[in-house]
Image: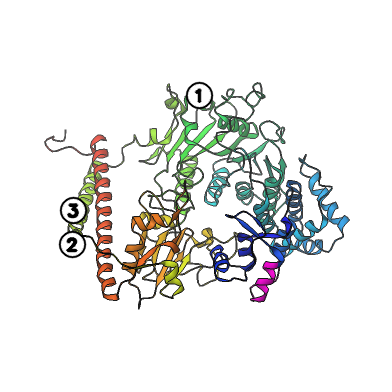
Amino acid sequence: MASQGERLTAAEISRLAGVTRATVSNWRRRHPDFPQPSGGTEASPSYDRRQVEAWLDARGRLPARSARDELRVGLREPTQCDVEAVALFAAHVAGFGKKERDKIAALGDDELLGLLSQAASSTGPVERSHADVPAALLRSAANVIREEGPLAVFDVLEEHSEAPTGVRGLHATPPVLAEMMADLAVTGGPRVRSVLDPACGGGRLLAAAAARLEPGAGVHGQEYRAVTAALARTRIADESPGPPADVRTGDSLRDDAFRDLRVDAVVCNPPYGDRDWGHDDLAFDTRWAYGVPPRSEPELAWIQHAMAHLNAGGLAVLLLPPATASRSSGRRIRAELLRHGAVRAVIALPPGLAVPYHIGLHVWIFRRPEAERPGQDLVLLMDAADEAVATEGRSAGRSEASDGSGLHETILSTWKAFTTSTEFSEVPGTARAMAPIDLLDELVDLSPARHVRSAALITPDAALRHVTELTERLKTDVADLAEASRIGPWAAAGETGRTWRSATVADLARGGALAVHRGERAPTAGVPLTADVADRRVLRARDLVDGIPAGGDPGELQPAAPVVIEEGDVLLTQIVGPQGAATRVAGEDDAGCLLGSGVFLLRPDPERLDPWFLAGFVSAPDNVSQATTGTSTHQLVATRLRVPLLPPEEQTAYGLAFRRIHELRVSARNAAERAEETAELLANTLCGGALLPHGIEPS
């Protein structure tokens, strides 16, 4: 029997052959000579590598082994020491010039191990000794770096590294947030010549900040785990020219690697809800200038840690959960921060922008007070929770824009106006500048919505115009709904109901009646798209759920083997929600867009299948239920869906009926949304004094 290092899982076979997992499963079923499992379990078998490679080679399916493949082979049975060593090595080599990188793979074993020793010694204390790491493993990593760059090494390590434990470093800062926070950090304060991220994770936020600094600026970071810290060093070296970043390993709160460092700006997306942050060990720490953080408030510890590293007047920009602004246990510390003039802004973000996706996070901006100006500066409270965003989040039911530029621009322009103009007071319904004394009540609740939405939104004349326009549009939507409800007539199918023979989507695909595609992300970020698809929008799963046009950015979503949607394609979400699988037939607006991750596309042969007939039956609740797997997350297996075998004329009749049902749903949704919008505006304008009810004369 093959050893573990000589076996491949189905997922590894799919990567080796450059096909999907479904294709590998199909080979197993259809080809009797496909190698039999040599290990694993019944649900997750593994196969002898040599047998699989011979089988693929005989069919011309075995590509030349890449540098990545060689590294994967070297990591077939990795220890955490091996993973850490490769990460440290890649981070060290990332700082070399291209000519130096090209020569590394040709070095002798002792020289490669010497580079590893240099890498380990330059990062501070590491958890393990790397004396037993094979030089061949480092040479494989060097080949990947030469061909694809150092970040590609970490793509392979992600497949083999141990899953992180606890709450530290679980989620990277999304690019749209990293760019926004970096811009805020370098705007509205003194010139920034140094930056620190004390919980830098993979370095995306720190790299964004470093890219905005002048060459020669100091870039510092600390991360709990050595592998992730190495990724941060690599990312910054790859994306931000200049001196190497000083990224060290360790627990920033318990063992601050930069105890005496003062910088002009701090950026940080700290771990949330980590009650094991060191409360008992750090009770008398000198960093707690505004009060000892409660055990349940680690975010207040991170705030004061960031403040302790700022030069006078420097800014700290932190991404924090909304409870930080309102929890009663943090009231005293929030009050002290306000009294000393340390809080500059609290900005509420939309849900779905970052993990956890169901919560709208807050961006806080702090300043280390200068001289004697306690509490004299205003505080910006901004509620951007209703701004449109576009990320890979999961905020179902929200209409979101195609990229984060609108949100970014709105927040940055408001912040610039607040910091540069003495006349700034508010943006009605969005932002207010408030004196700290006005926020020091019994709650000290700094939630932006609590203060911003109390402002009058519009003038009485504008309110009347807006209400009148919405009411007219509501009447139109209601009329459209009434027209869409005139569907039928229907006829009873007899005493027992109609039955028919059916076939699965998989059967129909094998017979050529339709083709099945599933949107997937590219395994490696940053691979440029070809010119013919680079400017097309991506249809995401939430676009189907929301019933809106495609809104994804192909550069950010990185579709793998892009599939261009055609008019008449049937689109379904892979994740099945409470309302089933969101489905629609692609129209003119969808045609030409790219298929996004988590979306199935069924492309019927128009000579054999009516698209509306197909869409109606594959989205039927019973059909979807029988083709769904999973417990906590329900995922649709599109090939298991069943379709009645009916003649073309009957398909057309069913298709017309399903199309009218779809139009009824769309009309009902539009009317409901317009009614809710009108009702909310009326309630707000009446309560705000902009409008008067019938029977009351203006005073």
Q: Disc 1 on helix, strand or loop?
A: helix
Instruction: Please tell me whether residue 191 is drawn above or below residue 436 in the rendered image.
Output: below
Q: Residue at x 61, y 47 (%)?
A: 209
Q: Residue at x 48, y 68 (%)?
A: 563
Q: Quadrant of the N terminus?
A: bottom right
Q: Which residue is mark 2?
A: 492
Q: Which residue is mark 1?
A: 329
Residue 536: give x, y in percent of width and height. 46, 66
Estimate the spatial distance between the alpha carbons at disc 2 and disc 1, rounded to whole Å: 64 Å
Quick one: label 3 or label 1, which is nearer the N terminus?
1
Q: Which residues are magenta?
A: 51-66
Quick one: label 2 or label 1, which is nearer the N terminus?
1
Q: Disc 3 on helix, strand or loop?
A: helix
Give the residue type that dot 1 points to: Ser
- Looking at the image, which is closer to me, 255 or 161? 161
Asked if one can make out residue 232 in the rendered structure from this viewpoint, the answer is yes
Which mark, by number, is residue 475?
A: 3
Estimate the spatial distance between the alpha carbons at disc 3 and disc 1, rounded to whole Å: 49 Å
Q: Tell me: 485 left or right of 417.
A: left
Give the residue type that dot 2 points to: Ala
* Callout 3 touching callout 1 (CB < 8 Å): no
